Amino acid sequence: MYKVMVIATIIGIAPPLASWGHDGFGPGNTRYNPDETVINERSVNRLAPRWTVTPAPGRPGCEPAPGAPRAVGDRIYLLEAGGVAAYHAITGKRLWRNTGFSRISAGPIVAGGLVLVAGTACESASDYDGALIALDAATGVQRWRRTAAWTVDTAVADAGAVVTSGECGTCDDARYGVNAYRLDDGTPLWTHPNETLAGPVSAAGTVLLRRTTGRLDTRAGRITTGTPVWSTGLKPAAVAANPAGTQFYLRSDLGLAAHAATDGRRLWNIPKESGELAADGRRVYVASAGRVNTYDAGTGRLLWTRALTQPRDPVRAGGLLYLVTGAGTLTILRPGDGTVVRSRTVYSALTTHVVPAGGRLLTTQRKVIRAYEPG
């Protein structure tokens, strides 16, 4: 396998390095990998299993829900044994494991050579303190740790900073709060009590903060300073941004809307539209109500729709649109028109979205992670 990789590098066809560091690819939560070129419509029918990893379980009652792996460089990062582990992307061999956590509440996020994981007390009804721990991505050794009165339920890293938000059930003055830290060393940057992140989304360094007391509006602020940029009277959930970071995709009682990241102008709105989405800059793909609806990213105009059984977890990469359907079957479509792309490999019992990165497709079946590569 290594010899093949060396030869491929010499002739210029080596797979791109993986860069899937957040659950939704990057800080924009786009679920779109623009760098994946190896797995495409020509090669997806030749995918074959390369390795399987079953992460060791953690303490009963303290384990987080199974999630998709992160893939950065030549490493795969998983939640394992009540902590985090790194595996070699080519061989599936474990490289390190750090189990020094009680209960993981958010993450991992891989950014700036660090693996960020949020932890809080397990089996305690009164300890609401949250901790953000940064591990060295190469070795798993702790680089820094910061604690706050609020738990860490949501986090996003962008522009050299990481922002977290959560709650404190025993705090009278500020039940909710947001903290920001410098990524490389954990230096506190700013704190906003009585606010939460509207979602794990940053649009080119701008995040959305929702007030929890007084005037219940949502404000956009710079991730490095917390300085407000614009506000809206809505109380939306931030679903994603476009890859360029110029648009937010927000979900509220009005439906799905695109807003300019610079000033908050509403660019388009689709009433009653909801569901998980992927955004590739040209189109927005929404898995909703037994179908996939695809919209023009600039105008919101419906481009095509396709009926599917319980579609969810859309992902875009390599000229393909992946969706988990029904009881966990992987369905692959052409993003331009929704035509089904056939695959000899049957992917079933999937519990979350796939990760196409670094020339391989990673799937999650409950806690089992499988890697597929073109044969």
Image: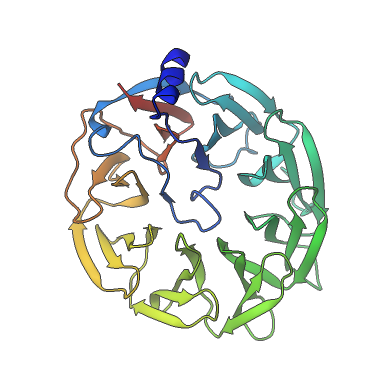
* Left or right relative to 281: residue 232: right
Identify whether 109 is placed above or below 177: above
Q: How is the image coloured?
A: rainbow
- Residue 201 appears in which quarter of the rendering? bottom right
Identify whether 254 is placed above or below 341: below
- Can the viewer see residue 38? yes
* Left or right relative to 120: residue 291: left
Identity of the residue drawn at 52% across and 82% down: 234
Residue 122 coordinates in the image, percent (x, y) = 72, 43
Residue 233 coordinates in the image, percent (x, y) = 55, 85
Residue 119 coordinates in the image, percent (x, y) = 71, 45
Identify whether 52 is placed above or below 176: above
Q: Quadrant of the N terminus?
A: top left
- Give the number of marks: 0
Identify whether 147 is placed above or below 205: above
* Left or right relative to 91: residue 168: right
Identity of the residue drawn at 46% across and 28% down: 368
Identity of the residue drawn at 40% across and 29% down: 12
Q: Identify which residue, 306 or 213, lies in the foreground.
A: 306
Identity of the residue drawn at 40% across and 80% down: 267
Residue 276 coordinates in the image, percent (x, y) = 39, 58
Q: Quadrant of the C terminus?
A: top left
